[in-house]
Image (cartoon, coloured by chain):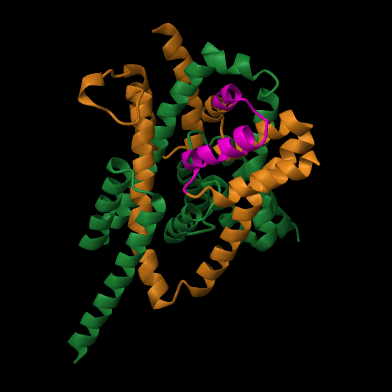
Amino acid sequence: MIYLKLFLSFLQIGLFSIGGGYAAMPLIKEQVVDINPWLTSMQFADIMAIAEMTPGPIAINCATFVGIRVGGILGAIVATFGCILPSCFIVITLAHFYYKYRDLKSVKGVLSGLRPAVIAMIASAGLGIFLLAVFGEKTVSAGSLHVDIRALLIFASGLFVLRKFKINPIYVMLSAGVCGMILYSVF
Amino acid sequence: MTEKKDKYLKLFFTTFRVSAFTFGGGFVIIPLLKRKFVDELHWINEEEMLDLTAIAQSSPGAVAVNASVIIGYHVAGLLGALISAIATVLPPLVIISVISVFYKAFRDNVIVSMAMKGMLAGVAAVIFDVVINMASALIKQKRILPLLVMAAAFTASYFFKVNVIVIILVCALIGVMDSVIRERKMKGEER
């Protein structure tokens, strides 16, 4: 029963991948390459590259890709469903308790410690993406300073219009994509 | 009834649109969700958004799905959570299904990779914008400890690649100790 197998495999991926995207990669590889003969290592590398180029969480992208190869559209749906089921259940439970107990003093204390940490982690992810866009690497060493002026230009003008005119970020990303096509093909 | 239906529809299409633009990993969805649900629709406030992000981040699974599900649950209960979950997975499900047919051509396409490079820079700008907003709200509180926690968490996360769960646990502990100490101080002053 291939659908059940898909479902259970991605259920495990969804349940045990804590910490988002890249933390899930080895877990996904184990399930779809090593344990089950669904993808070759090369195909797995391909889907990782595609997952980075397309929107959506890596685990979901992978579930769809594997599901469709193994069991068509229904396979993709089953795998995706398995992937999100555990976390949906867990976050709804946590959210329920959050709204019930957030006015308790101890919970307030916990939350007041978490808020700055969340901002810091978003900033850290943002800096990683910025460096990847401008220098081509997530961590920059002094020896490999190759600045991508075009990306820097897109970043700076994007940030400027966001700060100045408060426009919808989705439009900023769309125009950044169009600018990318123009700038990288002209220069 | 129509008002409720309107809310469900709005929840679905807002989440769907945001999910369709979540390039580059889980955290990218947070600024986009914040812009929509906090700044535009006013369905949740800024503090709640940070708290929900912490829950989404410390639970297993994709951060993007977790965050939307919690927002959906808050806005419209279990049905809202279901609507958000479907709206979040639908864009990648459809896009990858289509691409899987000709994925080699897509992967090697020059135009696509140019657009993606541009979008990556755009994503960075969007995240910076939201971080500036959030951090300046924190600075306005005029308390030193949250700023120290923010700086330390950033250093731990970016430079030392400390696991997010560890960061979250340590910061939660600092938050509890801080509130206990402040309470003792207040009681001491009363005497």
Give me the residue at 45% from left, 9% from top. Answer: A185
Which secondary structure is most common in the magenta stretch?
Answer: helix
Give me the residue at 53% from left, 52% from top. Answer: B60
Query: Is residue A37 found inside the magenta-colored segment of the image?
Result: yes
Front position in the image: B106 or A9: A9
> For residue A157, which quarter of the picture?
top left
> For residue B146, which quarter of the picture?
bottom left
In the rendered image, which quarter contains the N terminus of chain B? bottom right
* Residue A63 in view, yes or no: yes
Q: Residue furthest front?
A: A35
A186 over A63 or under it: above or below: above
Give the image location of residue A140, x and y in percent.
27, 28
In the rendered image, which quarter contains the C terminus of chain B? bottom left
In the image, taking residue B13 as reference, residue B71 lies left or right, namely: left
Give me the residue at 67% from left, 61% from top. Answer: B78
Chain letter for green, please.
Answer: B
Q: Residue furthest top?
A: A186
Front position in the image: B141 or B123: B123
A63 over B70 or under it: above or below: above
Give the image location of residue B134, x and y in percent.
35, 51
Front position in the image: B150 or B71: B150
In the image, taking residue B174 as reference, residue B65 lies left or right, namely: right
Give me the residue at 21% from left, 81% from top. Answer: B185
Query: Is residue A80 found inside the magenta-colored segment of the image?
Result: no
Looking at the rendering, the stretch of residues picked out in magenta corresponds to A19-46
Give the image location of residue A29, x and y in percent.
57, 35
Give the image location of residue A146, x and y in percent.
28, 17
Chain letter for orange, please.
Answer: A
> For residue B91, which quarter of the picture?
top right
* Residue A168 in view, yes or no: no
